[in-house]
Amino acid sequence: MLFFPYLTRRHAAVVAAAALVLGLGTVVPAHADHSVNEALNVGEDGRFRATGSWGGNLSGGAEYVIFATRASLVAADTNSRYDVYLKDRVHGTLKRASVRGNGSQAWGRSDAGDVSDDGRYVTFSSRARFTSGDARGSMDTFLKDLDTGGVLRLARDWGQVDLSGNGKYLAFESKAKGYAGESDQDWDVFVYEIASGAVEIVSPPHEATDGNGISWGPSISRDGTRVAFSSSASNLVPGDANGVGDVFVRDLVAQRTERASRQVQGMDPVMDSVYPVISGKGGHVAFNSYTGADGPAYWSAHVMVTDLSSNETEWISRIPGAKSSEYPDEAPACGVSDSGRFVALASPLQLAEDDADDEWDAFVHDRTSNSSYVTSRRSDGSNNRADSWCSALSADGSTVSMVSDGSLTPQDTNGNYDVYVRSPLHLAP
Ligand SMILES: [Ca+2]
Ligand SMILES: [Ca+2]
Ligand SMILES: [Ca+2]
Ligand SMILES: [Ca+2]
């Protein structure tokens, strides 16, 4: 998942200043670290490119990273447009993914989506034409099979799409009628089985014929059986009486929905919970909550993680002593490791001792040691005084992908945003 910075640097500075006054500047211990950055905006010739790159979703094992760049990384790329590339980090090979079924290049900007764990399937969005019947100029989402070259244009009424790690399912949001018997035009969340084309509704209510609100923002587990989403409906589970939007998880095998934002620090949320990210195994969900431990946070969202087996929710982007309402708005989490222990997030807050600036940084939070660690550093470990955001986290939490407008490797002097992968993260045992 990728996002833009919000207008929060001023707020971050206020919180940082308050923390210093309160003696809270030192938050967590630093980790020993030997991880290095890998820049993705590098051509087949091994040279770093002068124009920027963007995106950076990872396969579960971090063997593959999908990103977009305006630079030409392979000789056949002569369109001077953003294209989507898939880097095989194990074999060091690079493929341009945003090409048509016959291998010809497209003439419009393409942006990176998701990649399956085996690197076979990718999703991307583009204004270019990839299939017959696709009008140039319309923004569409495509599914590409890199084994066969085949490109499938996903339906125009699909919004956000998430590919399951096993490459078999796509979770999507839509407000169109007709999917899985839906008769209204509210936003709902569905799962599409790639092999059969079957569509199943994910956001059904437990008692009524339809949810009494909108459901959106799906995130699907590796095996495709669990889908997290946001919903304003109050009839998806019994006893949802808080009157605000929540995050839910649907188990498509057990045909059961549970509320993941049921408890935040022991309290029923009094403000919305949004932007869920489910772990590959489906046991943990990170999301943003506008409710803090001490009540409504109003305009600031905090990153929370719910363990679905214990049903406990933890606020992880927290500076001790600061009030909820003093926090800046935070970006959605980028990933949760399979065990639920590690969470990738980005924040303008100084969540780690080694973060010495009020720029946005990418962090990995370790829920076991309750400490956060800056991953958007230079390879030599020095501080990067520029905004950086996370993109994705590997299943084991040892590899993170990021976008930074700083220079995280010595050859990056282009002054543009670029995608990096950092690994292996030597986090506390
Ligand atoms: Ca290009
Ligand atoms: Ca609710
Ligand atoms: Ca910072
Ligand atoms: Ca750069």
Image (spheres, rainbow, N blue to C red):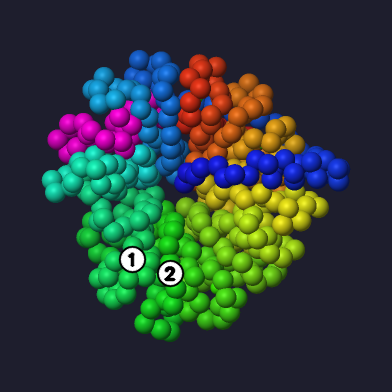
Q: Is residue 97 left or right of residue 228?
A: left
User: In the rendered structure, which segment of residues is drawn in magenta?
Assistant: 81-110
Mark 2 or mark 1, which is nearer the start of the sequence? 1
Picture disc at residue 214: 2
Q: Nearer the viewer, residue 99 or 109?
A: 109
Name the residue located 67 percent from the left edge and 38 percent from the top edge: 373
SS at mark 2 in the image: loop
**Residue beneath disc 1:** 175
Q: Is residue 314 above or below residue 365?
A: below
Residue 82 % position (x, y): 33, 31
Answer with the quarter of the image where residue 251 lies: bottom left
Give the CA distance from mark 1 to mark 2. Answer: 9 Å
Q: Is residue 98 magenta?
A: yes
Q: Answer few, some or many: residues within 10 Å of disc 2's Cα (few below 14, many 20 plus, some between 14 and 19).
A: many
Q: Main secondary structure of the magenta part?
A: loop
Q: Disc 1, disc 2: CB below 8 Å?
A: yes
Magenta stretch contains residue 239: no
Toward which corner of the image does residue 217 lie, by quadrant?
bottom left
Tell whether 419 sits left or right of 24.
left
Amino acid residing under circle 2: Ile
Residue type highlighted by circle 1: Lys
Q: Is 327 situated above or below 410?
A: below
Seen from this angle, which residue lies furthest bottom?
Answer: 207
**Which of the 4 quarters of the picture holds residue 375?**
top right
